[in-house]
Structures are given as C-alpha cells and as structure tokens.
Amino acid sequence: DGHGDLNYVLVSHAPDSDSWWNTIKNGIALAGEQMGVEVEYRNPPTGDLADMARIIEQAAASGPDGIITTLSDFDVLRGPIEDAVASGVDVIIMNSGTPEQAREVGALMYVGQPEYDAGLAAGQRAAGDGIASFLCVNHYISSPSSTERCQGFADGLGVELGNQMIDSGQDPAEIKNRVLAYLNANPETDAILTLGPTSADPTLLALDENGMAGDIYFGTFDLGENIVEGIKAGTIQWGIDQQPFLQAYLPVVVLANYHRYGVLPGNNINSGPGFVTVDGLTLVEEYAGEYR
Amino acid sequence: MNTRSTHAPIIEMRNIEKHFGAVIALAGVSLDIYPGECHCLLGDNGAGKSTFIKTMSGVHKPTKGEIIFEGRPMHFDTPRQAMDAGIATVHQHLAMIPLMSVSRNFFMGNEPVKRIAGIPFFDRAEADRVTMEEMRRMGINLRGPDQAVGTLSGGERQTVAICRAVYFGAKVLILDEPTSALGVRQTSNVLATIDKVRKQDVAVVFITHNVRHALAVGDRFTVLNRGQTLGTAQRGQITPDELQDMMAGGQELATLDDALGGTV
Amino acid sequence: MNTRSTHAPIIEMRNIEKHFGAVIALAGVSLDIYPGECHCLLGDNGAGKSTFIKTMSGVHKPTKGEIIFEGRPMHFDTPRQAMDAGIATVHQHLAMIPLMSVSRNFFMGNEPVKRIAGIPFFDRAEADRVTMEEMRRMGINLRGPDQAVGTLSGGERQTVAICRAVYFGAKVLILDEPTSALGVRQTSNVLATIDKVRKQDVAVVFITHNVRHALAVGDRFTVLNRGQTLGTAQRGQITPDELQDMMAGGQELATLDDALGGTV
Amino acid sequence: MSETAQPTPATDERIKEISGLRRALIRPELGGICGTVLVFTFFLLTALDSGMFSAQGVLNWSTVSAQFMIIAVGACLLMIAGEFDLSVGSMIGFAGMMIAIFSVTLGWPVWGAILITFALCVSIGALNGFIVIRTGLPSFIVTLAFLFILRGFTIYLPQTIERKTIIGGISEAAEGDWLAALFGGKILGGLFQWLGDAGLIAVFERGSRAGQPVVDGIPMLIVWAIALVIVGHVLLTRTRFGNWIFAAGGDAEAARNSGVPVNRVKILMFMFTAFCATVFATCQVMEFGSAGADRGLLKEFEAIIAVVIGGALLTGGYGSVIGAALGALIFGVVQQGLFFAGVESSLFRVFLGVILLGAVILNTYIRRMITGER
Amino acid sequence: MSETAQPTPATDERIKEISGLRRALIRPELGGICGTVLVFTFFLLTALDSGMFSAQGVLNWSTVSAQFMIIAVGACLLMIAGEFDLSVGSMIGFAGMMIAIFSVTLGWPVWGAILITFALCVSIGALNGFIVIRTGLPSFIVTLAFLFILRGFTIYLPQTIERKTIIGGISEAAEGDWLAALFGGKILGGLFQWLGDAGLIAVFERGSRAGQPVVDGIPMLIVWAIALVIVGHVLLTRTRFGNWIFAAGGDAEAARNSGVPVNRVKILMFMFTAFCATVFATCQVMEFGSAGADRGLLKEFEAIIAVVIGGALLTGGYGSVIGAALGALIFGVVQQGLFFAGVESSLFRVFLGVILLGAVILNTYIRRMITGER
Ligand SMILES: Nc1ncnc2c1ncn2[C@@H]1O[C@H](COP(=O)(O)OP(=O)(O)OP(=O)(O)O)[C@@H](O)[C@H]1O
Ligand SMILES: Nc1ncnc2c1ncn2[C@@H]1O[C@H](COP(=O)(O)OP(=O)(O)OP(=O)(O)O)[C@@H](O)[C@H]1O
Ligand SMILES: [Mg+2]
Ligand SMILES: [Mg+2]
C-alpha cells in the first residue's frame, strides 16, 4: 500500500488530544513525502503507557521496515521494543528516554532531548539570572517526563521542589485561576516554569490579569503561537525548544537512507534543548505550532 | 338516570382494532357512550379493556376503526388532544408522580397560566387554591398544597387522581380499575363520586373486576373478551350472576366447596 | 373445616408494634393462626395489614412484641429464615422478576442444588421439571420453563407466585391482596387454590378488601384499624354487613343514591 | 343523594407533628446551602490571610465557579427531566473547535461562526435526545457514544484541515465583533476603576498595569452564569414548562398519560444542555483566544457532580437549579481554596471525592425527610 | 370439592407463533455473536495481508481483548446484579501502584505485596458496596467519588514517597517469585518452540532471540481472562448464587422478599469487580515491571462498553458473561484492527462510538423479542 517501498510507524505515548504532537505528525508527513516513504502515526488514545506497549507489538506484527518510538517508560516499553528489534524491525528512539536506554533496547539511535537535563539546564540558567524560588505549572502530572522537567529545574536552582509544582489540570480557566491563586498565596515567587502551550497560554493570561506580566521571570518548555508572542512581548524570558520537528523528521530520513543506502550517523542526535529568546524569532513565529 | 333516547352519544367507537406487533389486543370493538351515563367496561384479565380506553384517551392510536366524538370523527394523536376535547382519564397505573407536590400533580399537563410580559408563567397561587379546595370537597384535608404525593396513602392518591379528572374532565371521565387497591371506605367514596359526577351529565366509563361495584353505579355494561365485545346490557336487563358469567369470558368458573357458596 | 380446639396455633403474634421513624404503623396487634384455617386479615388502606404480615414473614423486625412459631419464640432476621421455618408469602407487590424465566423465578431464593465436587450447582433440570409440573397442576400451560415472566399476563404471574408459595410453604401461606388485579375467572381460581391448600392443613393468611372474597373462603376474620386490631370473628358469627362496617374502620360509609342500594 | 363521606381527620394520631421550622428547611437546596456555609466557614478560618477573600481572590474562585455553573444549569434541568448527558465535555471541545475552524480557518466573521456553532451543537443535542427517545436506550449509553464521537471529530477535523490540534488567533479575528463581546468581554469596568481610585479595592503596585485596580470588571462568563441560573430557576419553578420537566423525570409514562409532551420536553432539555456547553466553549474560546482538542475533558462529570451536590436526584424528577448553582460554587471554592490554603494539589481529587460523598449522603437524608420515603 | 378450573388454552389465537429457530436464536449473547462475526469478516476482507492474522498479530489483539475481558467479567456480573462501578480504572492504577510501593519502596517480597494489594483492593470494593447498600445512593455517584479518591491517592502517594509518578524495578524484584509468575509469565512455551522449529509459525530472524518463535507462549493475562470468563459464566448460569445475581439486579425488593440475600450478593459483586481490576493491574505490573499513576484511565468505560455491547442491560437483571467476553473481543479486535487497517488513529473514537450505538440498538431489538416488552 501507499506510494513508498518503505513503511515506518511512529508510536508516541501522548493522548490523542495533546497538541504538541501535532508538530510531530507534520514532521513525519513532510519527511515521508520528501523521502518517498510511508509513515504512520500511532498513539494510545488515553495516553496509557500499557496500551502503548500493545501498539508497539501491533506495529511490529504488521511488519514495517522501521519503528520510531518514544521511550517514556523504560520498564514498560523495553519488552515490546526488544521483540520488534528481534523480529527484524529497525527501531529509533525519539523524544523521551535516554541514549543509554536506547542502546540497551537495541535501537539504532536516539533523537531527542533528555528531559531532566533540559530542566537542569533551564534551572541553571535561571539561577544565573538570580532566581531563588519558582512555580512549576504541571498540566500533565501523571506523566513522568513532566515531573522530571520540574525536578531538573529545581535541582538546577538548587532548591527543594516540594509544593512549588502544582497539578494544574488541563482546563485553561482552571490553569489560569490556579496560577493566580498560587501567586496570590505566594506573592514572593520569583519565577514561573510552564511545560508547554497547554499550561503556558493560560499562564500568560493570568500574568496579564494580575499585572505581573513582564515583572516575573517566566520560562517555558516547547513552543506555540502564544508563547512566541510572549517571548516577543518580553513576558516570557525564554522557551526551551526541543525541536519536535527534528525528532520526527530526522528518524524518518535516517531510516530511509539506512534502508536504501546503508548509511547511518555514528552518534545520537540531541534535538534540544535550544533556548529560544527574543532574538531571531521570525521563522519560529511563522511556523510555531506547525513545524516548531 | 339517562337513557339512550334522551341524548346523542358523546363518543362512538366504531370497530376499533389495535395490534401490538404480533399481539392483537383489540379485534374490532364498537361502543357508544352517552352523557350522564356510567358505562361499565368489564372482562377478563387481558381482555383489552385498558387498551380500549387508551385508544379513547389518545394514548394509543387505533390500528383500524373510527372514533366519533360529539358527532365528528376524531383522531387523537396525543393524550393532550383528548384532554382538550374533554376526555379525562384515570389510568390503571396511577398517573401521579410521587416526588411532586399535590398541586403540581393536580395540574400536571393542564397548568393554569398567568401571562407576565407575554411569558406564560405557571400560576401557582391559583393552582394551590384550586387544589386545596377540590381536595377538601372530596373530604381530604391536605397538610398543604406542597405536600409530596409520595406521602399520601394509596386511597388518597387515587382520590387526587379522580378529583383531578373530574375537575378537568368536563364531558367524559374514564376510570380504569380505580377501586382495585382501595379499602371499603375509600371504595365507597369513589363510587359516590362517580355517582355525583354522572348526575352532572358527565359520561363515565368505569372499568372494574368487581360485579358489585359495577352493579352499584353502572347504567350499562359492556363485556370484552379476548379483544372482542360480548355485547352491551342495560341495567335491570341482566342479573348479577349472568353478568358474572359474562365477565369470566363465558367460561366455567372454578367452584368452591359447597359450604362456601357456589360463586364468588 | 378446623376449629380452634383441634390444634395448637402454629403462629402466635403477641402485641406486635412496628414504628417507621415518626410513623407508628402497628400499635400492638395480637393474633393466633391455626393450621388448616384460612384467616382473613381485613382493614382500611394503611391499616397496617401489609406491615403486619411482613413482620410475620421476616421482612420487617417488629419494634416490640413476640412471635411464637410452633410454640417457640422466633426472631426472623431475614425472609429466608421465615421461609426455611415454613412461612411462604405472596407479597402485595408481586415478588416476581419480569426478565427472569419462570423456573428461575419459581425457585428464586430456594434453588434446588446438585453438588458436583462439593460445589453447589443449581439443578436446572430439576427446577424446570418441577416448575412445568406445578404450573400444569394449576391449569397454566407454559410455552417452556425458560419463558420470561414478563411475557405472562397479570393473572398468570399471580398464579406463579401463589404456586411457588404453595410448593415451598409447607406450613403457613400468606397472601397479600392476591386478587386485587384479577379478573373474575382468575379470582375464582385463586380462591379455589386457597381452599385446596387449606384442606392440606396449611394455615392461610389472606388479605383482601373484598368482603365477598373473604366470606367465600375465610374461617376467621381479623380486622385491623389504624395499627390496632378491632377483634377477630369466627365464620358464621358475623354477617357480611357487620364485617363490611368493621372493615371500613367503624366509620360510616358514603351512601349512594337509594336506587343503587345502600352499601357496596 | 347524600354528600360525600365525612372528611378524613385532619391530623393522624399515628404521625408525630413536624415543626414549622423544620418544614421550612426541608427543600432540595438545603444540602447545598449547608455545604456552602460549611465550605466558606472552613476557608475563612484556614485561608483568610492567603488572599482568597481579597477582591482578586474572590474574582478568582467566582470565575471557576461560574464555569461550573454554566454547565451545571443545563445538566441540572436535564437530570430533573430524567436523563443525563455524558457528552458535555466533548461538546465543549467540539464547539470551541468549530468556532475556531469557522472563524480562523474559513475566515468567516466571528458572529457567524458563533451562530452556526450554536446551531450545530444544539442540533447534536437534539439528535442525542432523539436517539434516546426513539430507541428507549438509557441516556448513559447514547451520550457515552457521543462522548467518543464528538471527541474524535474534535481531534480529527483540525488535524486534517489545519494540521494542528490547537487553533489560535481567534482573539484577533474577534476584535470588534459585536457577538464575541457578549462572551469574552468584561462589564462594569468603570465601577471598578472608581472603586480602585477610591481605594476601596487594591490597585496593582508593580508591573505593566500599576495603578489599575486589581479587578477591572466582571467577566461575561460570570454574567452568563448568573443569567443562566436565573433563567433556569424561573423556568423550572415558575412556568408550566418547569412542571413538565419535573413530570417527565418523575415518571415519563404517567406524565405522558396526563398530556405532558414528554418527548418534546426531554429533547428540549438535551438541546438546552448542549446550548450551555456551547456557551461555556464560546466564553472559553473568546477569553483564551484559542481552541484545543483537549478542552472540556471530564467536564461532564464535574457538571453531574455539581448538580448532585446541589441536591438533585440522579434518577430524575427532583432537584433545583439554585442547588446546582450552589453545588458549582462549592466545587469551585473548594478547588481554588485548596490552592490558596496550600494543600498538596494532587490531593484535590481525594477531597473532591470525599465532598461528593458527604454531600449526597446529606442530601439523601434531607430528601427522605421531605418525601417520607424510606 | 372440584378440581381447579379447566386448563387455560395452550395457545392463544391472538398471538402469532414464534418459529423454533428464531426462539433458539434469541439469547442475550446473540448481539455479541453477530457483532463478532461481522467484525472478523470485515477485517478478514480489509486487513488480511497486514499481519493482523499472523501468529504475532493474533497474539496482539488477543492480549488486548483479554485485558478488556478481565475487567468486563467483573463489570458484567456487577451490572447484572444491578449496580455499576466507575472506579475500576482508578482501582487499576491504585492496585498497580500499591504493588510497586510495597515491593520496591518498602522492599517486601513480591508475593506479599500482591497478596496485601488484593486484600486492600477487595476491601475497597466491599466498602463501595457497603456504602451503596447502606445509603441507598446510586452506585454511579458512590463509585464516581471513589474514581477521584483512588486516582488522587495513586498520584499523591508515589509523588510523596518516591517523588515520581512511575515506580519501576518491579521485574527485578519479582525475579523467581512464585506468585508473580502466576500473573506475569507465559505458558505452553514448549509447544510454541516446537511450532517454530517445525516452521508452523515465524521465528525471529536476528538479534538476541534469533531462531526463537515470534510467539513464545500464551501470556498469563490470556489464561486469566479465559479462567475468569469460565468461572463467571458457570457462576452466573449454573449455580444458585448466579440466580441470586439475576434476582438482585432484576428487582432487589422482590428478591429480598423471596429470601435472596441481596445485600450480600451486591457487596460480593463489588468485591469481585475489584478483584478483577486487581488481577488486571497485577498482570500489567508483572508484565511491564513498573506502575504508573495514569494506568487504567477510562478503563471503567471500556469495561462498561464491552459489557453493554455483549448484551447486558445497564439497569441490571439481564446479561451474559459470554456476551461480555465477546464484547471485549469485538472491542479489542476493532481497536487493534483499525491500526492494522491503517485508519487515521484520531478517528478511532468515532468508530468506537458508532459501534457502541449500533451494538446496543441491535441488542435492544433482540431483548424486546425475548421479553415481549415494548
Ligand atoms: N403496549 C403493548 N404492546 C403489546 N401488547 C400489549 C400492549 N399493551 C397491552 N398489550 C396486550 O394486549 C392485551 C390486552 O391488554 P390490556 O391491558 O388492554 O388488558 P386489560 O383488559 O386491561 O386487562 P387487566 O384487567 O388485567 O387490566 C394483553 O394481552 C396485553 O398483553
Ligand atoms: N417502610 C415504611 N416506612 C414508613 N412507613 C411505612 C412503611 N411501610 C408502611 N408504612 C406506613 O405504615 C402504614 C401501614 O401501611 P401498610 O402498607 O401496612 O397498610 P395496608 O394495611 O397494607 O394498606 P393497603 O390496604 O393500602 O395495602 C401506612 O401509613 C404506611 O404509610
Ligand atoms: Mg387493564
Ligand atoms: Mg397492603
């Protein structure tokens, strides 16, 4: 089926309403088109990692040439990935997990941004800017990688995470008002860290409303239209861009070239963390939410 | 008491048939009902009595047959239309809602309306007043019009239902086994009410399994059997025993020990 | 017919009281029931008849008072215990489950058991056989034992319930208004069954609002009024009119137009 | 002919008298009132100095409560009419996405997008109701199916059309739109500015808005919530249609036999629920300027919880809009209050569950007093 | 005395005869059977060459279906007993987390952790049931409260104890544990090895497991599913307790009056549902070696959907375990099959909703034929 001689499947761990993964879908679509291969996107509808394991097994059973998958829980996904590798499918790990884990399960390579390290880097940067306390708005508390980001940031600052991470839920009004409530109750907070557009957009509005916009130190993971606006307006100091586009695009290109010509990069690829600041925003602005 | 000759019938049911899927509940029943008479509808369980009066009150649409109301053919699509035409019904399974107050139940589907700025508001003061008054006339003193129907006894509920039907049912009042769960005193109240209503020139259709209740108030008696009518008899033209036999569908009754008397 | 002197009572109810929160449903009722008699329990709506027999059958625990069964004080905690002791009850609101088959309903709570490897399996073959047989004996031909009760007519369901009670109720059979919704023929069947059961030396407690049904099969008549007993009368010691008056709680009845006969 | 029998005795010696006060107290919303008093007392004692009761704090939990109220009113009337709707949350996501697609992707004027979305969503509500009525299936199942179907489309459509699952840029499109202002603006800005100037409410001390009052108006969201509560309450208690709602939920068959157009009532209530969900979605889209495929997740439960805390009966026929509004208020205050009080936020769910249980048990007790039911 | 009345006529001229075949066909699981045939036909036609029916593919959808079956059996019996449980999903998350905390954090032997978790979860099930029975509240509300409470603890506990929301390392702890093998292992490994050697099923081509068959045994998950379905089916149809389950759900009051210990039946069914959820969680934890706070999300709906597709009545008193198992099979096959068939994954929910609706409408039609109900 399809127009290509090569079939790949990308399996993510995200529930299917998660907007960040959209860039991934666009990335594989573009790569598939450019390379002339077929790439399918699969994810567990509710974000249940155990379901994701089944999807990897399923993908392996359907006999593709390669699988690109996240490694958001090493314990859960290791078995299915190893089986896939053993049955002759080439695997590339993207987005979550670590290079070591990728090697352990027998994947060709790892493309992504180690979450804890990214958080740590951000924390160290913030510490350099004189920050001593922060609020981490976690809109996806049950996912380990989001907790790792907050933890890394706290460690980067050299403070205890404790109550500074809030479970904000995913409803924008609730996020906004929870941020407001927290800042109201803890007015001495120096900085805010959000974990993506879902929490960053309402937080921007919250800061607008309580007048702290531009006054409080604000960093975020991942980009989106409003985040880019915020960076431009100076409300947001930086956005950590892990460049999802690359995480999707590169594995496809790598796999296709590997299968066609037997060439393979000698190393893992860190797609992030890249700090996006007010400098050089034009392209970012144009493609935010689509390719950025 | 009225006789056939003094009035034209208020409802003529002509050859009514009603099928429910594979079940033929009514296989062509005809009946005339006159104002001011109490027409008893008798018959075995499953004979089709409830089904028949439901076609009359707009709950079911007859599969075949004609309903002629006050001389004009009528097609009731909903119970409302029948009600608006003047046919009030107390169904076998009480049409009362336990969690609602007496006055809300009393006016359910027929709420008095007070227009304020063109919006039809429910006139609760009026509803409460009428309810209290009508219930008092029936000999029931409510704690208040907002008492929930669920707190009334079975007999009291039955009375509310009849009272409501009488209040709205200007022309025809249909009662489907209203006395089956009632005590002697409550039954006698209901029968007295039927008697009173009939005197106001209302046509009453009264379904019962009790020959004595039927004979106490009935002017005419129609017996249904397996979806067909066994005919209509005038009061005085039929003895209780004959009626009893007909109600049993013409089949022989189980007889009890002689010491206990032959029939029930 | 049995008289008091020939047997000891099978159940003695002594000063039974039952309160539901603020409601005093029974205010001290005493009653003896003898094997082989049909004891009619009469009374107004809300007099407490159903509540009384429910204390007898283990559904309610009496607030005060004693139940002496076969000479020994008894405390029924659940309907099961009463059933196991030999008290079978057909409740006013039918104890049948429409979606279940006749034979499952028949044996509900009393399933015949066949042990295979110590596990008590439901012996369906046996259940089906008994059901078909017992129903046939009552004059009802089922399509099959797995026919759903919901497809039976009201009269048929009533018969299943009685049949079940008779089958299990070795010693005492309690019937709470079994005839209220039944047609003449079905009623006469039920009364004949009561008669037959009584002859097998079973004690029958029969609740009804119909004087004629009571007089047709009753040996003794106890009238309840507002949670208290107005006394027990022997068959032959009381006229139908006296009984009727007592059933109405001693209060005057509504009288109908003279032409219709004074009482109901 | 004699008159009917002598009146039955006015009092029954077998029933103890219920005191007047107690009788005045037993109403469906009593549980909600008690709960509200309890919750406010609790937070006044524990979180008074956390800013929860400053102008800003009040606005904060009011907004969250108002959100719950909007969907609770719809869910309440529907529940009283004997049905419920699990597709509310998906409907919120769907409605927001439709507005975004019509206004941003297709470039329609925002008022047009809003109107067509309302029409579409209310029709889906009607379809829900129609299926429930025609098939006689429990609404749980039918609306569960729509929960999945609508959410599926909410993800699929923008993904296919725009290649995103969040569509932004609605704020810009809505600039100056007359209908958008009805959902996204604020009112009484002048009043609050005056209050701030007069020193009656705090003003910002730092940041871009220094000098402005901390609360600069009442968001339209709150106005909608109050309006819907009033309309719902009046509809339910003061109109004949309200009586029909009770009747349809209390016993559909009995109501039908009494001439109440039960099917129409139920379908209209499904439509009203969809309407409320769409109001919610429109306010959200207008305030946040974007629509996302994950909006409204679990909102159906939150609506049902608010309604049930407010004293309505899950099985229909009993309840009150005021009660549901109080339920929403309790819900909102507890949720935000826990943040103000600094409670570990992942425990919020535990509290929610406990409050839900406590509230329904209280309500059951009250209802039993009213109906004498056992 | 004469005998009772003459027998009523055996046939009623007013009812048309129902043919024998038709009568043999009308049983609760008929809808499920039709659905299964339909679904397999569909995928055999559209996805035959996609690997869906290779050994590996079959194992894949069997495993997913088995998962659904395990919780569907519990949900089915509970639903037939007239209640349902929305806390199943949270219970799965909670049970897994408890096993992880006991075995990894506290360092208990895994068998001890599993046993104590079973005891704990079954007790919570009993508590659910106890509250429902004692307060007379609808189980929807009570178990909704527990949905939140259990999920709250599942997030809060590891967060507080371990500062993570996923606890791993259970595989290592479970190495050689006798009880863990009952949940996490595979059986019939020898058979499959032989099949592989004989060339009847594919073998791995490379890597560490080259030469081994792609399917190296039947996972215990499937064994558990089959065992539970058999036990549930026998319990329901062949024992007196099964009759009580039907009776309790059909009409609790009537059943109680007939001597059925309704409260005990219902509480036991709540416990059984919790048991099934814990089996699910234990298998999952043992297979994957970690427990996460988001495990089991929405599983309560999936269980209910499988049961309803399988022909049970949401209001209780009617249904079949075989039907529920077929419902789970349909659900699993469709879910995985859509992947095999390459359907856009965001449309999965739309399909799910449509299938749910179609299945219940079919079932309703069948049930009406059985009961003659209108
Ligand atoms: N909605 C329906 N669908 C199918 N069959 C029906 C329906 N309503 C009634 N029937 C059947 O039609 C027949 C007549 O029923 P109906 O209720 O009219 O009897 P009835 O004379 O009122 O009996 P009873 O004295 O027991 O109240 C019965 O066989 C019944 O099962
Ligand atoms: N579970 C209960 N809780 C509270 N009150 C009850 C309960 N059961 C019955 N009652 C009240 O007790 C009184 C007696 O009721 P009961 O059902 O025993 O009357 P009955 O004699 O059987 O009447 P009927 O002839 O109408 O069947 C009534 O006032 C009734 O409302
Ligand atoms: Mg009838
Ligand atoms: Mg009674």
Image: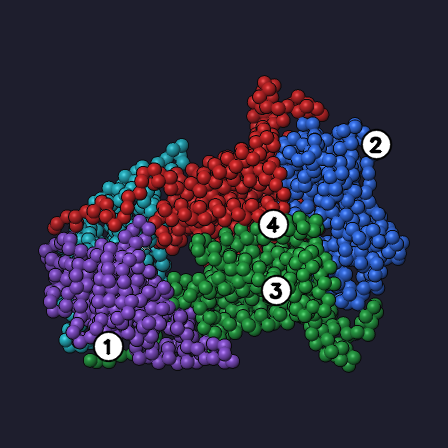
Chain colours: A blue, B purple, C cyan, D green, E red
Position of the N terminus of chain D, as image quadrant, is bottom left
| Residues tagged by mark 2 and mark 3 found on one chain of the structure | no
Which circle, 2 or 3, is nearer the viewer? 3
Would you name the residue on which mark 3 appears? Answer: D115
Q: How crowded is mark 3: few (under 14 residues within 10 Å), some or many (20 or more)?
A: few
Mark 4 surroundings within 10 Å by alpha-carbon count, few (fewer than 14), some (14 through 19), many (20 or more)? many
Determine the residue positioned at 63% across, 67% down: D66
Q: Where is residue E43 in the image (x, y as percent from the top left)?
A: 54, 35
In three-dimensional space, the C-alpha distance between marks 3 and 4, rounded to whole angstroms, equals 23 Å
Closer to us: A245 or C248: A245
The circle on residue B201 is: 1
Do we see residue E259 in this rendering? Answer: no
For image coordinates 66% across by 24% down, the residue present is E204
- SS class of the residue under badge 1? loop
Question: Does residue B238 appear left or right of residue D338 in this picture?
Answer: left
Q: Is mark 4 within 8 Å of ligand 1?
A: no
Residue type, mark 2 in image: Gly
Residues at discs 1 and 3 in contact (Cβ within 8 Å): no
Residue hosting label 4: D152
